[in-house]
C-alpha cells in the first residue's frame, strides 16, 4: 500500500496532468487511510468534476461542507460541479459565499475566472466581461490569460460589440495561438467569417486568387479529373463535408441557387451530376458547387461562408478556365435557348 505522502503527491500531479481517473483513485485511496482529510476530499471532488461526475462531486463536497462550512475551497469546487449540472444560480451563490470568506489573492482571481465562464454559459455576457477584468486585475495566472481574453472576445461578439470583440480576439490569439483550433467550433464567429478584419487576425484571408490557386493545384494532380471530382471529398475528408439536395436549407441563398441551377439543367437533364461541398481547411469555410458532366468538362462555383461569390469557372481535362458566373454558365444558357 502506498504511503499517505505518496498518494497526496501523485494525486496532485495527476490532477495537474489532467489524468482525472487516476487522480481520483489516488485520493479515494487516501480517504480510506484518512477519512476526514479535507485535502483528499478536495482532490477527489476536483477529479470528479474533471470526469464530469458532477452529482457525485456535489454529494462528496456537501458532506465536507457540513463539517467546514467556511472552507472557500470546498465552496468553489461545489460551485464548479453545480455549473456542470447547469444549476447556475446555486453555483453563483456558492462562488459569492467563497468570495465573502476573503480567500488569498491567488484564489480570488481563480474564483473570478470561474465566475466569468459561468456567466458566459448563463448568457450574462456583460457580467462575464466584468468578472474577467476582475480576474485580470488580481493577476490571473499567465497560462490562463489567453483563454480569459478569448472568452471576453466571445462575450463582446454575443453583445454585438464587434470592435471590442475583434480587439480582444487579436490579443487572445497573440497570447495563445493554439486557440485557432477552437474557432470553427464556436458559433460566436460565424457572422465574422467574411469580415476582412477577422480574416486578417486569423491569417486565413479567402481571396479569389488564393481559392483559384488551391483548385488549380488540385486539378493538376496525377489523377486529373478523377481526383478533382471523385477524390476531392475523400482526399480532404478531415476538412470537407459533402451535401446533397436535402441538406441545403441551411446554406446561403446563392449556394442553393447555384445547386438548383445545375441540378435542373445538368443532373435532371441526365448528362452529369452536381454536389455541394463545405471545405474548411482554414479557419474560414467556403462552399464549393462542383458539376461533372458526361464529357470531359465541368463547372465549379465557390462561395464564402455568408454566400458571396468568390470564384467561378469551367474546366476540361487539365485546366480550369476562371471567369465570372454569367460567363461560366453561358454554355448552359445557350442550351436552354436552343431547346
Image (cartoon, rainbow, N blue to C red):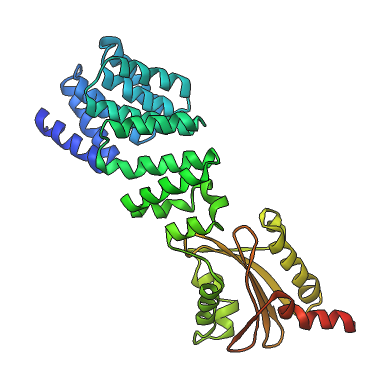
Foreground of the two, 297 or 285: 285
Q: Quadrant of residue 94?
A: top left
Q: Quadrant of residue 70?
A: top left
Q: Is residue 40 left or right of residue 148?
A: left
Residue 43 image position (x, y, % from top left): 24, 29
Residue at the spot 62% in from the left edge and 57% down from the top edge:
306
97 in relation to 282, above or below: above
Residue 112 image position (x, y, % from top left): 34, 28
Foreground of the two, 272 or 168: 168
Q: Quadrant of the N terminus?
A: top left
Q: Is residue 222 left or right of residue 339?
A: left
Foreground of the two, 149 or 257: 149
Residue 248 image position (x, y, % from top left): 69, 58
Q: Quadrant of the C terminus?
A: bottom right
85 in relation to 169, above or below: above
The reply to whether residue 188 is visible in this rendering is yes
Residue 133 image position (x, y, % from top left): 36, 33
The reply to whether residue 47 is visible in this rendering is no
Amino acid at each position: 500500500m502506498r504511503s499517505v505522502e505518496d498518494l497526496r503527491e501523485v494525486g496532485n500531479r495527476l490532477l495537474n496532468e489532467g489524468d482525472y481517473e487516476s487522480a481520483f483513485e489516488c485520493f479515494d485511496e487516501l480517504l480510506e487511510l484518512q477519512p476526514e482529510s479535507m485535502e483528499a476530499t478536495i482532490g477527489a471532488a476536483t477529479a470528479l468534476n474533471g470526469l464530469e461526475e458532477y452529482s457525485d462531486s456535489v454529494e462528496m463536497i456537501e458532506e465536507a461542507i457540513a463539517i467546514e462550512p467556511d472552507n472557500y475551497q470546498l465552496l468553489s469546487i461545489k460551485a464548479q460541479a453545480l455549473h456542470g449540472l447547469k444549476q447556475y444560480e446555486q453555483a453563483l451563490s456558492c462562488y459569492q459565499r467563497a468570495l465573502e470568506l476573503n480567500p488569498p489573492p491567488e484564489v480570488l482571481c481563480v474564483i473570478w475566472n470561474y465566475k466569468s465562464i459561468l456567466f458566459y454559459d448563463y448568457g450574462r455576457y456583460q457580467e462575464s466581461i466584468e468578472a474577467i477584468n476582475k480576474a485580470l486585475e488580481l493577476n490571473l495566472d499567465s497560462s490562463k490569460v489567453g483563454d480569459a481574453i478569448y472568452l471576453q472576445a466571445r462575450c463582446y461578439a454575443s453583445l454585438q460589440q464587434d470592435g471590442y470583440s475583434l480587439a480582444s480576439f487579436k490579443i487572445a490569439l497573440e497570447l495563445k495561438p493554439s486557440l485557432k483550433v477552437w474557432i470553427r467550433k464556436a458559433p460566436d464567429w460565424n457572422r465574422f467569417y467574411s469580415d476582412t478584419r477577422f480574416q486578417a487576425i486569423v491569417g486565413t484571408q479567402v481571396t479569389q486568387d488564393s481559392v483559384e490557386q488551391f483548385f488549380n493545384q488540385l486539378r493538376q494532380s496525377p489523377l486529373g479529373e478523377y481526383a478533382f471530382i471523385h477524390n476531392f471529398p475523400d482526399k480532404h475528408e478531415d476538412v470537407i463535408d459533402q451535401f446533397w439536395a436535402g441538406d441545403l436549407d441551411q446554406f446561403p441563398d446563392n449556394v442553393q441557387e447555384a445547386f438548383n441551377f445545375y441540378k435542373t439543367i445538368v443532373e435532371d437533364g441526365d448528362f452529369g451530376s452536381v454536389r455541394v461541398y463545405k471545405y474548411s481547411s482554414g479557419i474560414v469555410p467556403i462552399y464549393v458547387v462542383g458539376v461533372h458532366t458526361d464529357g470531359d468538362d465541368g463547372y465549379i462555383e465557390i462561395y464564402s461562408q455568408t454566400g458571396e461569390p468568390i470564384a467561378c469557372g469551367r474546366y476540361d481535362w487539365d485546366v480550369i478556365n476562371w471567369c465570372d458566373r454569367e460567363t461560366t454558365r453561358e454554355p448552359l444558357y445557350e442550351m436552354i435557348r436552343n431547346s
